[in-house]
Amino acid sequence: MAEPLHPELENPRRRDFIHVATGAFVATGAAMVVYPFIQQMNPSADVLAMATVEVDLSKLQPGQGMKVKWQGKPVLIRYRTPAEISDAIKADTADLRDPEKDAARVKAEHPNFLIAVGVCTHLGCVPLGAASGETRGEYGGFYCPCHGSVYDTSGRIRKGPAPKNLEVPKYAFKSPTVVEIG
Amino acid sequence: MFKLGAFFAGLGFAAAVLWGIWNYEGLAYPDAVKQLHAKPKEVVFANDGAFGSYDLAQLQRGFAVYKGVCSSCHSMKLVSFNAMRDLGYSEAQVKALAKTYDVASIDDKGEPTTRKGLPSDNFPGPYANDEAARAANNGALPPDMSLLASAREEGPRYIYSLITGYAANNTAHYKQLDETTDSSGHKTKLEKLVKYETPDGKYYNPYFSNLNISMPPPLAADGLVDYTDGTKATREQMAKDVSAFLTWTSEPKLEARKRMGTNVLAFLAVLIVLTYLSKRKIWANIK
Amino acid sequence: MAMDWMVDYQPKSGISKWIDQRLPLPRLVYNTLGGYPTPKNLNYFWNFGSLAGMFLVIQIVTGIVLAMHYSANTLVAFNSVEHIMRDVNYGWLIRYLHMNGASFFFVVVYIHIFRGLYYGSYKEPREMLWILGVVIMLLMMATAFMGYVLKWGQMSFWGAKVITGLFSAIPLIGTSIQTLLVGGPVPDNYTLNRFFSLHYLLPFVIVGVVILHIWALHIPGSNNPLGIDVKGPQDTVSFHPYYTIKDLFGVCVALFIFCIFVFFTPDLLGDPDNSIMANPMATPAHIKPEWYFWPFYGILRAFTFDFFGIPAKLWGVLAMFSSILLLFVLPWLDNSPVRSANFRPIYRQMFIVFVIDILVLGWCGGSPAAEPYVIISRFATAYYFIHFLVLVPIVARLETPVSLPKSIGTPVLNYGNLQPAE
């Protein structure tokens, strides 16, 4: 008899090793299977591909604004008048909740265009003030109707519950009247 | 009682089919399509087999053939410009490529217009809709090419064979069975060779399902497409390249699939050995 | 056959006692998968029950994920499937698992059924277990058929049209039933929406019936290759660890074969025509269902002639439905007290012929509707019905079985080759 009668008694370590290895492999395999099933919930390739949008600004007049869709979110664009620009620069010194200079929120060559993501930093509503006729709040910028946050002409939070300024997306001017957002 | 009922039900079904066997009409004489239809030619592609992967240079050449020849009639609506980066094009190249296409859009007055394509767009088709496509092609609809290689048996080989398989109309002959009855009622069967007639406006192609295809030979001459990588653009080469390209449009994830498959199978092979050893250990004391 | 030697669940720690008194879920799991006394002589054909369970889980998990990305609308359904294949992270993997998982679910369940037929697992006292199994198979067929329609390719559409058309063969009310199922004159958006809803629902109904199936299994206990009753503790082992590890080994082997299909020939079992979007104006040249319906499709197409005043169409539909439904009464057709075909020399030969017959029917059902396939399928269909309804009852009465071993424990000397001493 080459085989011992009770191999598990004579060589308990080897027996344990095989069961432990099997268990470890099964657990590893299960973990690897979970990965694609979680990953499929993340944005798909076609959603990620919508990363940039080109906007033609030639139709805007000073004082007017527009809303464009970028990655599913609204982007507010305002062609600011000289008075609005100077208001914004004046407020640089004011006691701001989220201190930021106006110059840091616009491009130096195109200070007349304010481009900001139209998602209120409070709970995500779209502030009013881009389209003509909409209320712009007491600082002449944007006003969020959900909970009353007020933004100035630089998109900075001035009043209400929102904690931060409107986010400025990455953008670049392709020509004096065409901007690429994203 | 129940079994008697089952017994007769069984005999009933059996009798019904046996009645059909009794009335067997025999094999039909193979028609022209059966006789002349050809199986796809044998062609080897880089992506064949368990470890095969795409030849990117070939896919790029195939895309050039699609763009230069096929795309004037065939759409490729499921493929996005962005997906072309899998062929080895850079982001900038894809952007530039997309710009060369006009995509349907609506202007600010609500009128239909076009805009320059973006990487996130899919390839626009050559026609506004299927009706326009039929109207421009004698009533035939050029199929969308995105899934063409999956939508035919032996897809890539079929496409290659079809493109290179056009034959002059007057060469094809098939056998016909003539049955004549003389005055005494005696039947004689005679096989004769008949010339295959292709209807007007169609082209004879033995690889096409009913032999008569509406598409004129698409790669009629060598050098129809300018290859930038120095490959000679013979008809066979172009057909092979575009077949490989259409395999990719059908199955863009083929390489990831095979790579993952190899790893998964290796893992499972180890696990099979481990569970087998575990099982043997556990069962060792059961007699 | 109560196996009173089963060691009942013993909660050890205080917390497991606490739980056991309030919600005895651990007790239920233990009694089902832990201490359940299982015949010790089961061969590898007994793995296919747990494999079927695994593929059911694979189908439900991948199906729920696919439903997160799929749109049940005829305008976008086909493209949303391609969106899964091209854009969704690992979408191709999940869809290929689901597609091939359906086929493997049927492979495994068909082998499970043939095992039951060979070893007489449908016989007293397991009739209810068998009937619930047939119910599961019918539910699987309905689910698979509706799932195939969801892709909204050419075969989806024409499959939906042809299969619902079967019901129109029923005299008087047939057309009304067909319209009710489809929701209109031809399959369209309304059909796709209801099929999606039902395709999502039915798998959970299957889970419910599977639970009943397992419950019905645990009352009499498992059958075994000898087909004789378990006599005492010397004949059984506890399910865990003996059969949990054996099933796990089987699962790994099955997954290996499954993965060869999923990763290396994912479209082999599919049909190229389903890569073309549904077109109600043009029928594909060669309509055929998925392979797992081929034997039944072969029976359907064997009838192309009116006979005995009944139209061909009705004959085909009657025969096709009867071929499945007669499985419900099989326990009462076969009165032989011997379960395992190993001890029934004539039935054993018949069984082999029957398996070949099913394969021939499948081959005919997947071939074009032309000769010689039609005449072959007629012979095969005749045998199918004669086998179940004529030969099985007669052979059960006339056959002299080989003498059975006294118990699972006795043929201990040649245990392993499963051919007991005669």
Image (spheres, coloured by chain):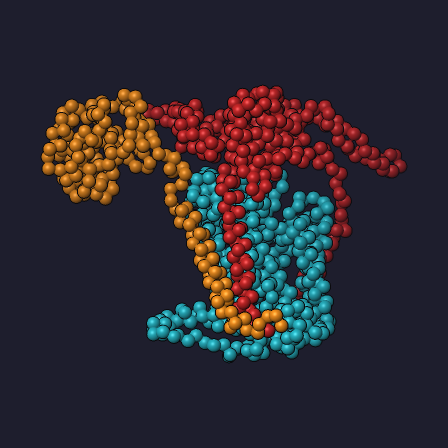
- Looking at the image, which residue is at 57% across and 72% down? A4
Question: Which quarter of the rendered picture does the N terminus of chain B lie within?
Answer: bottom right
- Does the image show residue C138? no
Question: Which quarter of the rendered picture does the C terminus of chain B lie within?
Answer: bottom right
> In the rendering, at what x and y percent does residue A129 appear?
20, 32
Q: Looking at the image, is B63 positioned above or below residue C316?
A: above
> In the rendering, at what x and y percent does residue C339 appear?
64, 70
Q: Colour of chain A?
A: orange
Q: Colour of chain B?
A: red
- Looking at the image, which residue is at 48% across and 28% down? B125
User: Closer to the camera, C381 or C130?
Assistant: C130
Query: Which quarter of the figure has residue A115?
Result: top left
Q: Colour of chain C?
A: cyan
Q: Most extreme residue toward the right, as rendered?
A: B184
Query: Which quarter of the figure has residue B202?
Result: top right
Q: Looking at the image, is B2 positioned above or below residue B179?
A: below
User: Closer to the camera, C121 or B135?
Assistant: C121
- Does the image show residue B269? yes
- Looking at the image, which residue is at 51% across and 48% down? B263
- Image check: C244 left or right of C123? left
Number of labels in the image equals 0
User: Closer to the camera, C422 or C84?
Assistant: C422
- Image check: B85 left or right of A130? right
> In the rendering, at what x and y percent does residue C151 appear?
50, 43
Query: Which quarter of the figure has residue C408?
Result: bottom right
- Looking at the image, which residue is at 70% across and 66% down? C347
> In the rendering, at what x and y percent does residue C62 appear?
46, 51
Q: Looking at the image, is C332 positioned above or below residue A130?
A: below
- Image check: C250 left or right of A137? right
